[in-house]
Image: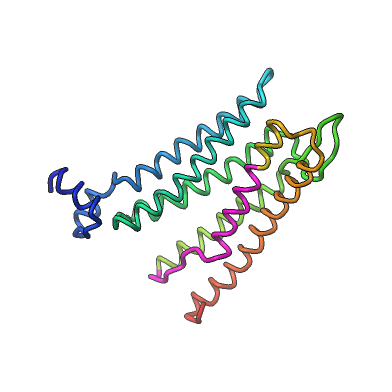
């Protein structure tokens, strides 16, 4: 199939054969958006490191925030495009959640490494520390590894084990907390009220991550035992 018919299939949402879906759809617009989000994630990491270097400017945190929000927008857009134009592929099903986890977990890791890892709202001169502790990153990353392993095991037995409400909301809480940390580090670090809000959002993100992980474990036990999920 030539490039023009393939494009026509993409834009009109017509289904393709399994062979064409495996080959022609690999670089469809949805997957390209996923790869773009991967690139944006690396840029976000770079901005955090630039802000942390000697002479680094808080402006880099604002730039990192803008790029992070752009990456979130591509996450919504690639899902919408894949469903609207029937462009869902095996590559997309694997790459999309992987890139999401890389973006969120990598950003939390760099916060814990580059900032003063203190989630307890401690004053330091005119600044208020409202950051991410290393143990919080361990909870977030550990949860992702565990759920990914459970999902992979379930799907290896041809059992669907997709994200549910709790998992989707977990991404929302984590993303909001990350945006708050960016804003706090960039311009609002002297404002007690926003530092308090940032601290609350960080703890909510960690708590929801832990809760969703526990619920996924119980759900996996029922699914693998062929009980109603």
What are the residue bounds of the magenta stretch? Answer: 157-179
Q: Is residue 159 magenta?
A: yes
Residue 212 vertical placement versus 225 (above, below): above
Give the total of numbered labels: 0
In percent of the image, x 20 and y 46: which residue is there? Answer: 7
What colour scheme does the image use?
Answer: rainbow
Report whether 11 appears left or right of 82: left
Residue 11 in the image: state x and y as whole percent.
Answer: 24, 50
Residue 4 in the image: state x and y as whole percent.
Answer: 15, 44
Snapshot quadrant of residue 216: bottom right
In percent of the image, x 63 and y 53: which residue is there? Answer: 173
Residue furthest out toward the top: 55
Residue furthest out toward the left: 1
In percent of the image, x 66 and y 22: which residue is there? Answer: 57
Q: Report the magenta stretch's main SS.
A: helix
Name the foreground residue: 29 vs 50: 29
Report whether 50 appears left or right of 157: right
Residue 118 in the image: state x and y as whole percent.
Answer: 78, 41
Residue furthest out toward the bottom: 227
Residue 188 in the image: state x and y as whole percent.
Answer: 73, 34
Snapshot quadrant of residue 64: top right
Name the foreground residue: 103 vs 11: 11
In percent of the image, x 52 and y 66: which residue is there? Answer: 164
Q: Is residue 132 magenta?
A: no
């Amino acid at each position: 199939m030539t490039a023009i018919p393939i494009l026509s299939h993409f834009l009109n949402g017509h289904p393709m054969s399994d062979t064409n879906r495996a080959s022609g759809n690999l670089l469809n617009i949805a997957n390209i958006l996923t790869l773009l989000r991967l690139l944006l994630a690396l840029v976000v990491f770079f901005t955090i490191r630039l802000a942390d270097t000697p002479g680094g400017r808080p402006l880099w945190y604002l730039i990192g925030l803008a790029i992070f929000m752009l990456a979130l927008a591509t996450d919504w857009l690639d899902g919408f495009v894949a469903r609207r134009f029937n462009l869902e592929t095996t590559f997309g099903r694997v790459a999309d959640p992987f890139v999401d986890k890389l973006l969120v977990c990598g950003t939390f890791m760099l916060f814990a490494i580059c900032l003063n890892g203190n989630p307890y709202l401690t004053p330091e001169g005119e600044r208020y520390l409202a950051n991410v502790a290393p143990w919080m990153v361990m909870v977030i990353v550990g949860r992702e590894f565990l759920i990914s392993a459970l999902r992979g095991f379930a799907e290896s037995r041809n059992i669907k084990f997709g994200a549910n409400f709790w998992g989707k909301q977990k991404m929302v809480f984590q993303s909001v907390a990350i945006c708050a940390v960016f804003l706090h580090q960039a311009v609002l670090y002297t404002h007690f009220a926003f530092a308090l809000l940032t601290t609350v959002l960080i703890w909510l993100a960690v708590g929801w991550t832990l809760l969703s992980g526990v619920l996924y474990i119980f759900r996996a036990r029922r699914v693998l035992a062929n009980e109603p999920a």
